Amino acid sequence: MWYVLNVCTAVASSNAVLDARGARKLGHASIAVSTAGIVVTVFVGIILYLLLARATTGSATYATGAASSSSSCRYTYRGTCYGYKDYVGYYGGCSGQKTSSGYCYYG
């Protein structure tokens, strides 16, 4: 096995030396593909960052809106003031106060 590996390495090396022009072309192609990969990675990273920043900003705005809406009561349920009301249905989840009719009051 070791002998076969050495023979293959020697053949590849001698072919590269014999075909210097082809090796140069492969080297340039390798650099171009690597550069394109880096550019694509940076581009995707920027897009992901912007999407995550928008999602985080949206939830921060939502939290700020929920906190500020408590001073101006939009909805009242059982004597408690809530900023938002959504219909979630009988089985839907709710992070606030859920009514028997399927509404969720929160914020």
Image (tube, helix red, strand yellow):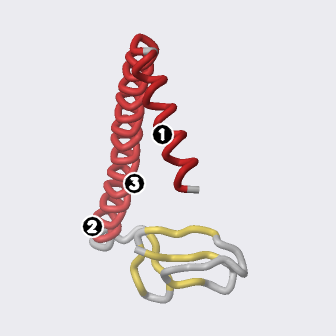
Dot 1 lies on which element?
Answer: helix
Lower sequence index among marks 1 and 3: 1
- Compare residues 30 and 81 and report the one nearer the observer: 30
Q: Nearer the viewer, mark 3 or mark 2?
A: 3
Number of marks: 3
Dot 2 lies on which element? helix
The single residue placed furthest to the top in the displayed view is 21
Q: Where does label 1 land, which residue?
A: 9
Q: Which element carries disc 3, helix, strand or loop? A: helix
Residue identified by numbered label 2: 68
User: Which residue position is annotated with label 3?
Assistant: 55
Q: Amino acid at mark 1?
A: Thr
Measured Cα–Cα span from mark 1 to mark 3: 52 Å
- Residue shown at 57% from the left, 68% from the top: 86
Query: Residue 2 location, x and y as percent?
Result: 53, 55
**Viewer-side label of 2, 1:** 1
* Residue 79 pos. (x, y %): 43, 88
